[in-house]
Image: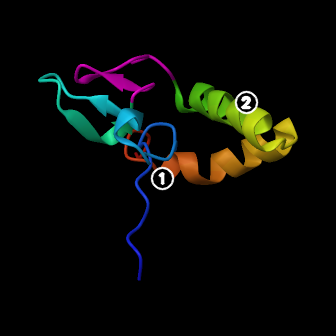
Amino acid sequence: MPPKPLICQSCGKPLDRPSDHGTEADGTPSAEYCAVCYKHGAFSQPAATMEQMIDRAANVLVIQMGLPLAKAKELVATYMPKLRRWKQ
């Protein structure tokens, strides 16, 4: 079985390349968060809600994959609550 792909545990972005990874406070790459969500050991937008993040991620899917906005939001809403940052 191939290894499970790494994804940002805040937004779901694939962490395919070293440059995709955010950074910890000491400058080392984050194993869990992307460069957009996490810099220098802290979230870039600490007050963001899961609903706001769903909207942002859905907009990316609309642009990158050409999905209708409603379908993109539906898709993102299925995985976002399972990510470490948003788990209750």
The residue at the point 34 percent across, 40 percent down is 18
Residue 35 in percent (x, y) is at 39, 28
Horizontal side of 54 relative to 40 (left or right) equals: right
Q: Are marks 2 and 1 in contact (CB under 8 Å)?
A: no
Q: Residues within 10 Å of mark 2 (few under 14, many from 20)?
A: some
Residue furthest to the bottom: 1
Secondary structure at badge 1 equals helix
**Disc 2 from disc 1: Cα separation:** 19 Å
Residue 7 in percent (x, y) is at 44, 49
- Above or below, 42 relative to 7: above
Q: Quadrant of residue 41?
A: top left
Secondary structure at badge 2 equals helix
The residue at the point 41 percent across, 36 percent down is 20
Q: Residues within 10 Å of mark 1 (few under 14, many from 20)?
A: some
Horizontal side of 27 relative to 70 (left or right) equals: left
Residue 57 in percent (x, y) is at 63, 34
Instruction: Name the chief secondary structure element in magenta.
Output: loop
Residue 34 in percent (x, y) is at 40, 34
- The reply to whether the magenta stretch includes residue 47 is yes
- Identify the residue under disc 2: 59
The residue range painted magenta reads 35-48
- The amino acid on which the numbered mark 2 sits, given as a three-letter code, is Asn
Q: What colouring style does the render use?
A: rainbow
- Identify the residue under disc 1: 82
- Above or below, 87 relative to 43: below
Q: Quadrant of the C terminus?
A: top left
Residue furthest to the left: 26
Numbered tag placed on residue 45 in the rendering: none
- The amino acid on which the numbered mark 1 sits, given as a three-letter code, is Lys
Which label sits in the foreground, 2 or 1? 2
